[in-house]
Image (cartoon, rainbow, N blue to C red):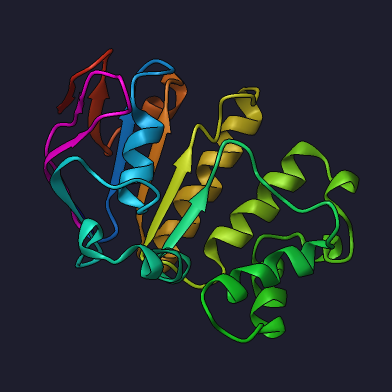
Amino acid sequence: MIHSHGLQYTYPRGEPLRFGDVSVAQGGTLLLRGPSGSGKSTWLALASGLLTATAGEVVVSGQSVGALPANARDRWRARHIGFLPQKLHLSEALSVVDNLGLVFFAAGLPVDRATVAQTLQALGIEALATRRPSQLSGGQAQRVALARALLLHPGVILADEPTASLDDEACAASLNLLSTCASRLNATLVIATHDARVLQALPQARLLEFNAAVQVAA
């Protein structure tokens, strides 16, 4: 679940971004909808503890994110948040299996290769296990990144513009995969997007509308 109240963030020499209050139950879906540059990625960074709010509070899976000491946030994030960024950040020096193994390292856990294999199989990409990122298509790389996000069975999945560069068929497949995976884990799903196709595909989702400076819950 995710609850936020009075959430604000101010970049150096910038105007404050003020975010509407939201409450999303466990297993629910939230869309952050608005144009590029309106603060959607900032909201995701606040919810995942990559940034610290300058005012207000966001509570994720029962944890007040801002209350976590800085040195505890990375481990908390690795264990509780599945993050699918715009740039997938797969290490070219490592195989797909070893890229996924980094998730356990970040969480302070021993690498569980059986779980890695099961997750790849669940997403239909077990044949990619020994490939390097440069040997993957765009769709394959996105599935590997999704596998990485799901590996520790997170309670919350955050996806930043996951359909921005996809055609209609690939967009529909990507959203179906995200929704199916979130449903299987009973995870709260948050998608930041400016793509109207996402709202059409997920009409039941709660909305947080973004404009230039003020965000309004709908």
**Residue drawn at the location 77% of the way across and 53% of the way down:** 91
The picture places residue 216, in percent across and down from the top left corner, at 15, 25
The answer to whether 206 appears left or right of 188 in the picture is left
Tell me where residue 44 sits by quadrant.
Answer: top left
**Residue drawn at the location 27% of the way across and 52% of the way down:** 28
The answer to whether 176 appears left or right of 103 in the picture is left
Q: Which segment is the magenta one? A: 4-25
The answer to whether 27 appears left or right of 148 in the picture is left
The picture places residue 124, in percent across and down from the top left corner, at 72, 60
**Residue drawn at the location 31% of the way across and 49% of the way down:** 47
Depth order, front residue of 109/71: 71
**Residue drawn at the location 76% of the way across and 60% of the way down:** 125
Q: Is residue 17 magenta?
A: yes
Depth order, front residue of 125/49: 49
Tell me if residue 36 comes above or below residue 192 in the rendering.
above
Q: Residue furthest front?
A: 13
Tell me where residue 146 sits by quadrant.
Answer: bottom right
Tell me if residue 30 comes above or below residue 194 in the rendering.
below
Quadrant holding the C terminus: top left
Q: Is residue 172 magenta?
A: no
The picture places residue 160, in percent across and down from the top left corner, at 48, 37
The answer to whether 6 appears left or right of 164 in the picture is left
Quadrant holding the N terminus: bottom left
Depth order, front residue of 80/75: 75
